[in-house]
Image: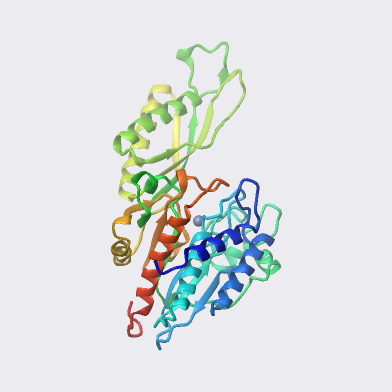
Amino acid sequence: MLINPGRLWSSIMEIAEIGKIPGGGCRRLSLSPEDGAARDLFARWCREAGCTVEVDAFGNMFAIRRGIAESDRLVMTGSHLDTQPVGGRFDGIYGVLAGLEVVRTLNDLGLQTDRSVVVANWTNEEGARFSAAQTGSKGFAGQVSREEAYRLRTTDGLSFGEALNQIGYAGDGGPRPEQLACYLESHIEQGPVLEAAGKTIGIVESAQAARWYQVAVTGETRHAGTTPANRRRDAFMAASAFAVESRRQLLGMDPDIRFTIGRMELGTNAPNTVPGQASFTIDMRFPEDQVLNLAETLLRDVLSEVDQREGTRSRLQTTHLVPTVRFDADLVREVEVLAGDKGMRLSSGAMHDACAIAAIAPAAMIFVPSRDGISHHQDEWLEPSDAAIGADLLYKVIESKAKAATPLGSV
Ligand SMILES: [Zn+2]
């Protein structure tokens, strides 16, 4: 192993002291004073490791270890230092500090690289304080404008721009997106797949597609005591029948489809009234867009069958659509080769900064196992030995991408 496992672990534990909550977790909401303190510490460590630290208009931080080649192309890694309100010690932070460990290891070995190596800390990945996730990485990738980002507000009314200024992280530096030769992010899995398979490394091929729908069911509002069963057009019963039947059919189609109805509202919401209105959300996810197309057709068919049977009228509207993100096949293959028999390919169930960057540069991800698949919780845990194996793999891939002498303009 080339990296220093003890140094990596103690850095993770030291940052976890900032915004520490009972039970071992962290609360470092994006651009809060705690986030500012974690950023300051990270910047200090990076400067001590010989990097220059630049900040862009979104507050993204870039620790740059200069390469020696004429070309200004760079190899980037990173993740995020912000957490959920009740967050863990590893989600995001692991990827940033594994990146710093790569830089420290290059220093230990006295290696010069041709390309610059950059460790990024992306702003507001979590979307917990400003309700739009991956703001910084999407901004860098040109998917969110500076104006859109600066208009985001916290529940207490502070804008993204004001919060950036408060902690001193509104900058005008940073690399240009077209300088990226590639981007590789390491992250905890936040799911149970690696642990169940007994593997240490997840080679992430893609991030699954997601679709959100709003469904409105209309029946008739009637007296609960006087309306016989055969005269009812009960919106709740129709919605329930739809939910149960859809789940049965979807899981028959593919047991890996994620189908969730997380919110339902009834028009009258009164205990002694047959509800005439029901509206609810659907969150549906799967690695492949085509499967979600078929799943959506299935939902519409079930809805019209239920309407016929229950005498209701329903409308299903798409409210949000995220297509499958595919990571770069060559980079994924390189990670796989270096991971050897410790690794397995998988698809990410969650979105990450790498999903935004994948739109502008060859990108890939390395997952390490999270105990019991727990994340966004103080019980989140990463075994120190797994943290080390993941960071060592990250080092090997970054070193190989950054060292290669390549002419200007090629990948
Ligand atoms: Zn994360």
Q: In this view of the protein, can residue 270 be seen by the observer?
A: yes
Please give the name of the residue rendered at 49% of the width and 22% of the height, measured from the top-left corner. 234
Residue 169, percent from left and from top = 64, 70
Residue 352, percent from left and from top = 46, 58
The image quadrant that residue 337 belongs to is bottom left
Q: Is residue 269 above or below residue 66?
A: above
Foreground of the two, 315 or 104: 104
The image quadrant that residue 333 belongs to is bottom left
Q: In this view of the protein, can residue 319 be seen by the observer?
A: no
Please give the name of the residue rendered at 60% of the width and 26% of the height, measured from the top-left corner. 269
Please give the name of the residue rendered at 50% of the width and 11% of the height, measured from the top-left corner. 228
Residue 98, percent from left and from top = 48, 65
- 51 lies left or right of 245: right
Residue extending farthest bottom: 70
Q: Is residue 225 above or below residue 189?
A: above
Foreground of the two, 400 or 212: 400
Q: Is residue 410 above or below residue 226?
A: below
Q: Is residue 250 above or below residue 178?
A: above
Colour treatment of the image = rainbow
- 59 lies left or right of 297: right
Please give the name of the residue rendered at 59% of the width and 69% of the height, measured from the top-left corner. 42
The image quadrant that residue 238 belongs to is top left
Query: Could you tell me which quadrant the C terminus lies in?
Result: bottom left
Residue 218, percent from left and from top = 49, 29
Disc tally is 0
Query: Could you tell me which quadrant the N terminus lies in?
Result: bottom left
